[in-house]
């Protein structure tokens, strides 16, 4: 007897996202995603932390949630209470924190709590692609607000809120990445944060604040988190250890009042975020977080400078960008004739991975000539060689850059 072939294509739900493509390894010049600097990974201190916590607390792995309950490993929440106070100006207790499997899970939980199909969310116009796809999957309508050098524009937000109100629509939240925005790397100044709080209180619309990159302000100078500027309960705050320590650990957190947190905990049906990662982070962070982040920022700033130099050398005036004050990305604008969706495909054939701008926008035609380049993962040599290779491909396919340092290509 031959077993008949079976293909799940015949039974899957009709509303699934496009199927995944198989991972075949990283390209030679990898400028995509949110990877970190491998040379800055604190391997020895993490190794010591694993040994210490396992020797001390391995018995607790016998219980779901260890002895800390569903909100996550208590010493990690205790560390976060201190860190959020000193780094972000947020006063909270361990009861206000839910540890999540990456801040991506935090986003999923918040969307599950708030967004039903047809609901409206306000987002930033150039935006983290993951936020957009998640909201699309929830069936949300999105209203996007333009940014300037200081992040989301409050005049445009005020107009959007008034316009929605006039149409009888109450948005479920305003999503913002105020401290090192993705992809623009802007930092929203204090006055604008206060204005945002004022506006959202007036309209009774919550703020969803994503502080994924806030540890990576190169000079460490940043305004308090929005959550830290008000006692108003309408601010949901998420953060992550992905950018400050390591994305593969998959540890993030939500800070919220009990009215929201009790709902989010009920929606978190995975029976707990992996324990060893939480234990190791707590052990590591208590002893080393500040020193580690300081060192990491020095390394990232140097890589950002390398990429800035490489772009200036290879693209000349054809590449426009702001030198970032933090984070891991450059948000680059190329001349009008460049279509970064096309460039992305051709560059991939040459082993160069870039994030094309349209993926960071709602409107299909927007950000056509923008691209995002992550400088954290590649070495400085790879950054230089990769940007040169990209300039070559871009010149061949799109005719730019035409000249470099007065030399016609
Ligand atoms: C703005 C923003 N939020 C959240 C995430 C998700 O991070 P995590 O690794 O904590 O899930 C990312 C990842 O790049 C991001 O850019």
Image (cartoon, rainbow, N blue to C red):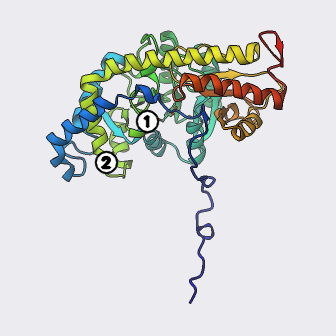
In the rendered view, tell whether residue 398 sits above or below residue 309: below
Which is in the foreground here, disc 1 or disc 2?
A: 1
In the rendered view, tell whether residue 203 sits above or below residue 220: below
Instruction: Give residue 374's position: percent from left, percent from top.
Output: 57, 27
What kind of element bears circle 1?
helix
What kind of element bears circle 2?
loop
Q: Tell me the residue at 53%/13% (across/down).
A: 325
Instruction: Give residue 403's position: percent from left, percent from top.
Output: 82, 15
Quadrant position of the N terminus in the picture: bottom right
Instruction: Give residue 75's position: percent from left, percent from top.
Output: 22, 33
Instruction: Give residue 116's position: percent from left, percent from top.
Output: 53, 47
Q: 10 Å neighbourhood of mark 1: few (<14), some, or many (≥20)?
A: some
Quadrant position of the C terminus in the picture: top right
Q: Are marks 1 and 2 in contact (CB under 8 Å)?
A: no
In the rendered view, tell whether residue 252 sits above or below residue 159: below
Q: Earlier in the sequence, mark 1 or mark 2?
A: 1
Q: Tell me the residue at 37%/43% (across/down).
A: 264
Q: Is residue 207 left or right of residue 130?
A: left
Q: Which residue is mark 2?
A: 272
Q: How many marks?
A: 2
Q: Is residue 148 left or right of residue 81?
A: right
Q: Is mark 1 within 8 Å of ligand 1?
A: yes
In three-dimensional space, the C-alpha distance between marks 1 and 2, rounded to whole angstroms, equals 18 Å
Mark number displayed over residue 198: none
Q: Tell me the residue at 35%/21% (across/down).
A: 292
Q: Is residue 59 left or right of residue 298?
A: left
Q: 10 Å neighbourhood of mark 2: few (<14), some, or many (≥20)?
A: some
Residue 183, visible in the rendered structure: no
Q: Which residue is mark 1?
A: 247
């Amino acid at each position: 007897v031959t077993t008949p072939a079976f293909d799940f294509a015949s039974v899957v739900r009709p509303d699934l996202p496009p199927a995944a493509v198989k991972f075949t390894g990283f390209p030679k010049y990898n400028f995509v995603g949110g990877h970190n600097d491998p040379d800055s990974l604190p391997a020895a201190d993490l190794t010591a932390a694993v040994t210490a916590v396992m020797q001390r607390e391995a018995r607790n792995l016998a219980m779901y949630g260890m002895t800390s309950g569903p909100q996550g490993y208590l010493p990690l929440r205790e560390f976060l209470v201190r860190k959020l106070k000193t780094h972000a100006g947020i006063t909270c207790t361990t009861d206000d924190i839910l540890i999540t499997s990456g801040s991506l899970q935090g986003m999923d939980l918040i969307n599950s709590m708030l967004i039903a199909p047809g609901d409206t969310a306000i987002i930033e116009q150039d935006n983290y692609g993951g936020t957009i796809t998640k909201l699309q999957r929830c069936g949300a309508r999105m209203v996007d607000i333009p940014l300037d050098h200081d992040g989301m524009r409050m005049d445009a937000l005020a107009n959007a809120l008034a316009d929605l109100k006039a149409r009888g629509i109450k948005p479920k939240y305003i999503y913002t990445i105020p401290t090192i925005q993705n992809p623009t790397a802007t930092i929203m100044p204090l006055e604008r944060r206060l204005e945002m709080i004022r506006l959202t209180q007036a309209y009774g619309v919550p703020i969803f604040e994503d502080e994924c990159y806030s540890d990576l302000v190169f000079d460490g100078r940043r305004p308090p988190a929005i959550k830290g500027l008000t006692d108003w309960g309408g601010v949901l705050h998420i953060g992550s250890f992905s950018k400050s320590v390591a994305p593969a650990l998959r540890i993030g957190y939500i800070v919220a009042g009990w009215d929201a947190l009790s709902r989010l905990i009920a929606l978190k049906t995975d029976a707990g975020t992996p324990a060893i990662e939480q234990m190791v982070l707590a052990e590591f962070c208590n002893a080393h977080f500040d020193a580690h982040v300081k060192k990491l920022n020095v390394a990232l700033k140097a890589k950002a400078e390398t990429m800035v130099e490489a772009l200036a050398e290879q693209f000349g005036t054809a590449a426009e960008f702001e030198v970032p004050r933090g984070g891991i990305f450059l948000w680059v604008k190329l001349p009008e004739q460049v279509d970064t969706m096309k460039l992305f495909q051709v560059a991939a054939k040459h082993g160069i991975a870039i994030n094309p701008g349209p993926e960071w926008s709602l409107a299909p035609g927007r950000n056509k000539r923008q691209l995002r380049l992550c400088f954290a993962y590649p070495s400085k040599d790879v950054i230089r060689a990769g940007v040169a290779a990209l300039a070559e491909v871009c010149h061949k396919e799109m005719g730019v850059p035409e000249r470099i340092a007065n030399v016609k290509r």
